[in-house]
Amino acid sequence: MENNNWLQQLVMLGVGTTSLVAEKLREASDELVKDGKLNPEQAKVFVDDMMHKLKSEQGNWETQMQKQVKNVMQDLGVPRQSETDELRGRIDRLERQVRDLENKLWR
């Protein structure tokens, strides 16, 4: 479905951004170690803590993005899958009823 592809692209953008931030964090911590402002263990703890926070925030970001997309689609009047399925079922029942009535008329 096209909408799922769009959402997947947004999620991938978030993952890519997370990877870029992780890389920059590592570079910054390596620079701090090189300058003698942190020892390697402190740098590792710093990066690990920041990555943990970043990953937990990414999960929140994905959840918030899904909620926002859902709200926008609802505002635009795009029906949910369950609503579409329900309407298809109703159409199928009506088509059967029309066929049954047509068959009774031809007997």
Image (cartoon, helix red, strand yellow):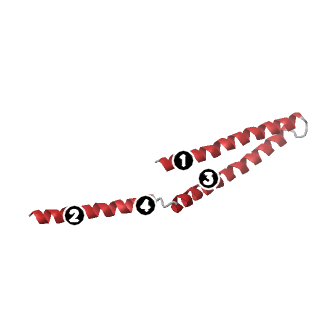
Kindly check if marks 1 and 4 are in contact, taking CB atoms under 8 A apart as contact. no
- Residue 98: mark: 2
- Disc 3 or 4, which lies upstream in sequence? 3
* Residue linked to disc 4: 82
* Residue linked to disc 3: 62
* Residue linked to disc 1: 6
Name the residue located 16 percent from the left edge and 63 percent from the top edge.
102
| Mark 1 to mark 4 CA distance (whole Å) | 20 Å
| Mark 3 to mark 1 CA distance (whole Å) | 13 Å
Direction left: furthest residue = 107
- Disc 2 or 3, which lies upstream in sequence? 3
Name the residue located 57 percent from the left edge and 44 percent from the top edge.
9
| Mark 2 to mark 3 CA distance (whole Å) | 46 Å
Quarter of the image with the C terminus in it: bottom left
Left/right of residue 69 with respect to residue 37 in the rendered view: left
- Disc 1 or 4, which lies upstream in sequence? 1
Q: Position of residue 92 (x, y in %)?
A: 29, 60
Q: Amino acid at mark 2?
A: Val
Determine whether 23 is above or below 51 in the image.
above
